[in-house]
Image (spheres, rainbow, N blue to C red):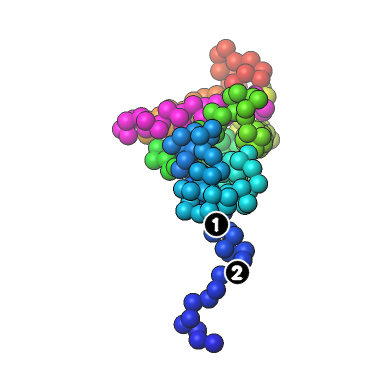
Amino acid sequence: MNPAAPQRRTQVERRNDSEEALLEAAADLVAERGIERASLAGISDRAGASRGLASHHFGSKDALMARLAQRAQNTINDAMTAAVTRSGRLVGDIPGLELLRSTVDTYLERFENPTSEDRALIVMWGATFPAEASPKGMLDADQRSHDGWTAMIEQGQRDGSVRTDIDPSIGAILLQALIRGLAASLLDSPPAGKGQVREACQAWITSAFTAPHEGTTAPPGSSPGSP
């Protein structure tokens, strides 16, 4: 066998490449037109494939949107994991409050210079508002995101960095709302102000979630379950 000869791709590799091209095309169309106007046939066309390929690979538009949402979330999670790895620590060894701050900052940093995939994620977040028309895959992704924020708050409460008078599930809802509202706002904000937005966000998280030190009290006006 000639070692210089190009190796033939396996069927699995070809399928993965096709799905990757379709997901990239889907991100472009969703970011440009919204979910309703991003048809499976149009996604196949944008990927330069036969019109039925997206349906062949994913079965339905809902399934494709679910994969696209998960792909975008995984990209952000990978960025967060990389930041933790650079610190030389494991996620479980990081105080929960620090993990919350780092995760929020990772999200917002991406949306300062968003890709089509990032923009598509914001569009898909908005698609969850009309409940009957909401793609089931997005609802599932929302629940996973909520569970992740909840787990970080609970970790902080166990290690003493996060206030214990916050209901973790309610805190997770607040963080999701904060991220999504700011992410959408950052898309068209002047570049000079984006860093200040992230700094203000970090200050708010510190103020709202930090456990009071011994001999101090919770912030004025706070009540159990209401950060």
Residue 169 located left or right of residue 40:
right
Near-viewer residue (214 or 221): 221
What is the distance, in whole Å, between disc 1 and disc 2 at their CAs? 12 Å
Residue position for label 1: 18
| Residue 165, image quadrant | top right
Q: At x 37% / y 34%, what residue is drawn?
A: 195
Quadrant of the image containing the C terminus: top right
Q: Amino acid at mark 2?
A: Thr
Which of the two residues, 33 or 180, is positioned nearer the viewer here?
A: 33
Q: Is residue 54 above or below residue 180?
A: below
* Relative image position of residue 30 (x, y in whole percent): 49, 38
Q: How many residues crowd around disc 1 within 10 Å: few (fewer than 14), some, or many (20 or more)?
A: some
* Label 2 SS: loop
Q: Which mark is residue 112?
A: none
Residue indicated by mark 2: 10
Q: Amino acid under label 1?
A: Ser
For label 1, the SS is helix
Tell me where residue 49 appears, x and y as whole percent. Answer: 51, 54
Q: Is residue 188 magenta?
A: yes
Residue 82 shows up from this direction: no
Query: Which segment did they paint magenta?
Result: 168-194
Q: Residue shown at 58%/64% (left/top)?
A: 13
Q: Nearer the viewer, residue 216 or 73?
A: 73
Which residue reaches farthest front? Answer: 51
Q: Residue at x 57, y 12 (%)?
A: 221
Query: Closer to the N terminus: mark 1 or mark 2?
Result: 2
Which residue extends farthest bottom?
Answer: 1
**Residue sitting at 48 percent across and 48 percent down?**
45
